[in-house]
């Protein structure tokens, strides 16, 4: 199959905008809890739709009184927290456009987002963020930026107080001004290369996509009785779309800004579904495996994992034998129930996006009783173009198009997208917008294929395809994902463009390393730098590479690798906030290592 188009199940009235979703929930007799936040004692307290609407209205009035006009851009720089969503909706109620900024951004990056968008105001989470915003404004001469408010302290109270003279009628006029075609937010791509581009996402993108998503069997996951906890950055389109979708469905959403507290928060809040990027699921699996191995129960865990995968595959095929059912039931008591309990005990589904999860991991989680619904999309497509649903799922794929969306595979394998999800264009970049569309189809830059039932599989990023000196095309993700799945490894970067063979840079997982060293008879105190040159560690990485090489041809196989002593992180400038590797930056910073690898005697191992 080369193309699939799924007609919309819901046609949204053109005069609607995102704010109508809040009004819809507040008008219900059930007055559902849209959010939950910790009180001073640390207990979770629900915030009902009517109360959320009232506070959003006060803040929106304050923005109007402060001179924020319809269509003006307002920045938000904060970690993931309730107030992020609060001011996001307040900006929309004021008829303005929100501009998210990653809270880890440097002053120059902040200046670019605020300056390029022409923001007139901004919210910063703390004094630290306010200082960065003001520093950016001063250094770049952002004279349009008239206000900077803090989410902490008395900043929001100041905004509320400012709106005391704004009438309900004026607020309603502003709130209802935007239609589906109007821009709701400008989200700047996290930028693995070059300057970030501002994606103009409309109210229609969010509303139509949300309504059509809820018209599928995903409404069994996302509904008024379900709960989720948001820990991904709300500056990223994936979390942002789910935030709007949750309001559309009446889901109760909690927030946690620090992933280090995620397990305790999951156990206290008990969500029914979560959303994460693949690396989070890899970490969950590897942490459980490491804990089992450290406790001398590694063999049991491996058998349990193999059984979960076998059970999931058999269920997908429609044939589960009695012996497999019994074995699965035993491991459910011994292993799976404990894994579910660690995540709060009530998580039945998880939504995965931001990169390929891998078939094995998908089957593992489904086999332990947590169905992962993998989807695919970009900032430019308001997150999901396609997604697996409870009733339409094929593990190992990223699903079929959401109603209202379409996918086409170009002659060169590039994935093209069309539909209610696709952005209006790049802000103030008509040149880039023109280059990104062909005959009305958005060029995603990813490569993939459709099966005969319309399920999409992603095979790589078009611009990341490596062409060796002999002309062989190599998709690095096929190798990287397999190697990175092991607990010992944190990150992998496959290299080899215009080189005689394929090589790889590997980093070690600092958290998993001590336990791994102890189990292999090495001092647990061995540092990352020391482990980099350790023969036992090198042999283990070589074994992982050998396994990955079995899935590709000899010409595509990794022939040499180097373990680098520093991990690729967002702080080091080697990962985007959504945990994608910045290939160009890594290759630049580790150029000497790469050159040494290719300058060494030609390797013989495969």
Image: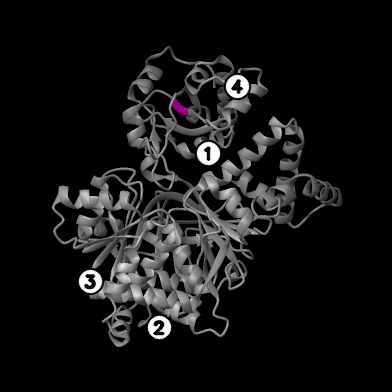
- Estimate the spatial distance between the alpha carbons at disc 1 and disc 2, rounded to whole Å: 43 Å
Sequence order check, earlier mark of 2 and 4: 2
Count every numbered label the image shows and give the total.
4
User: Disc 3 vs disc 4: which is toward the camera?
Assistant: 3
Residue position marked by numbered label 2 in the rendering: 13
In the picture of the structure, the residue carrying the numbered disc 4 is: 524
Colour option used = one colour
Badge nearest the viewer, 1 or 3: 3
Q: Nearer the viewer, residue 326 or 25?
A: 25
- Residue 275 included in the magenta stretch of the image: no
CB under 8 Å between callouts 2 and 3? no
Q: Secondary structure at mark 4?
A: loop
Dot 3 or dot 4: first in sequence order is 3
- Name the disc covering residue 377, or none: none
State the residue position of label 3.
Answer: 66
CA–CA distance between discs 3 and 4?
A: 58 Å
| Spatial separation of the CA atoms under disc 1 and disc 4 | 27 Å
CB-based contact (under 8 Å), mark 1 and mark 4: no
Q: Is residue 556 above or below residue 24?
A: above
Which residue sits at x=35%, y=30%?
587
Q: Which residues are magenta?
A: 502-506
Q: Residue furthest bottom?
A: 169
Q: In this picture, is 326 found above or below 48? A: above
**For numbered disc 1, what is the local secondary structure?**
helix
- Are the residues at dot 1 and dot 3 in contact (C-beta closer than 8 Å)? no
Q: Nearer the viewer, mark 2 or mark 4?
A: 4
């Amino acid at each position: 199959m080369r193309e699939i188009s799924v007609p919309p199940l819901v046609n949204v009235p053109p005069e609607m905008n995102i704010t109508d979703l809040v009004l819809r929930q507040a008008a219900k007799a059930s007055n559902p809890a849209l959010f939950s936040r910790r009180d001073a004692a640390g207990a979770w307290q629900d915030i009902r739709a009517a109360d959320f609407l009232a506070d959003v209205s006060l803040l929106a009035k304050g923005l109007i009184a402060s001179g924020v006009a319809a269509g003006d851009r307002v920045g938000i720089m904060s970690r993931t927290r309730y107030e992020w969503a609060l001011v996001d909706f307040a900006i929309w109620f004021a008829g303005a456009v929100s501009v998210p900024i990653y809270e880890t951004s440097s002053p120059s990056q902040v200046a670019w987002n605020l300056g390029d968008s022409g923001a007139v105001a901004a919210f910063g989470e703390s004094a630290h963020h306010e200082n960065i915003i003001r520093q950016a404004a001063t250094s770049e001469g952002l004279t349009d930026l008239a206000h900077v408010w803090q989410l902490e302290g008395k900043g929001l109270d100041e905004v509320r107080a400012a709106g005391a003279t704004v009438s309900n009628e004026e607020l309603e006029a502003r709130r209802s001004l935007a239609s589906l075609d109007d821009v709701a937010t400008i989200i700047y791509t996290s930028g693995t290369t070059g300057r970030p581009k501002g994606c103009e996402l409309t109210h229609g993108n969010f509303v139509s996509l949300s309504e059509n998503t809820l018209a599928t069997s995903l409404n069994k996951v996302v509904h008024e009785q379900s709960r989720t906890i948001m820990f991904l950055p709300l500056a990223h389109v994936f979390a942002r779309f789910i935030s709007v979708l949750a309001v559309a469905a009446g889901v109760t959403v909690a927030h946690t800004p620090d992933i280090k507290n995620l397990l305790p928060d999951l156990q206290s809040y008990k969500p029914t579904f979560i959303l994460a990027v693949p690396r989070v699921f890899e970490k969950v699996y590897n942490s459980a495996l490491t804990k089992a191995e450290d406790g001398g129960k590694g063999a049991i865990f491996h058998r349990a994992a193999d059984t979960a995968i076998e059970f999931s595959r058999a269920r997908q095929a429609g044939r589960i034998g009695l012996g497999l059912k019994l074995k699965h039931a035993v491991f459910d008591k011994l292993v799976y129930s404990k894994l579910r309990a660690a995540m709060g005990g009530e998580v039945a589904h998880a939504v995965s996006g931001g990169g390929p999860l891998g078939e094995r991991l998908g089957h593992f989680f489904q086999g332990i009783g947590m169905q992962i619904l993998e989807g695919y999309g970009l900032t430019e497509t308001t997150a999901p173009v396609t997604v697996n649903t409870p009733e339409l799922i094929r593990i190992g794929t990223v699903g079929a198009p959401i109603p209202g969306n379409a996918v086409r595979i170009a002659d060169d394998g590039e994935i093209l997208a069309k539909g209610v999800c696709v952005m209006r264009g790049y802000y103030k970049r008509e040149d880039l917008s023109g280059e990104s569309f062909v005959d009305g189809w958005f060029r995603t830059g990813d490569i993939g294929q459709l099966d005969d039932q319309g399920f999409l599989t992603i095979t790589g990023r078009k611009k990341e395809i490596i062409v060796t000196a002999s002309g062989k095309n190599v998709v690095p993700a096929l190798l990287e994902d397999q190697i990175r799945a092991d607990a010992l490894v944190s990150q992998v970067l496959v290299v080899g463009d215009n080189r005689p063979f394929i090589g790889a840079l590997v980093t070690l997982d600092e958290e998993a390393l001590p336990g791994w060293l102890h189990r292999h008879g090495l001092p647990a105190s061995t540092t990352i730098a020391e482990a980099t040159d350790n023969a036992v560690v090198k042999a283990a990485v070589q074994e992982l590479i050998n396994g990955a090489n079995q899935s590709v041809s000899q010409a595509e196989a990794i022939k040499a690798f180097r373990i680098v002593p520093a991990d690729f992180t967002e702080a080091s400038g080697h990962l985007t906030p959504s945990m994608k590797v910045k290939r160009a930056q890594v290759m630049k910073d580790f150029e000497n290592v790469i050159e040494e690898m290719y300058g060494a005697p030609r390797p013989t191992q495969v």
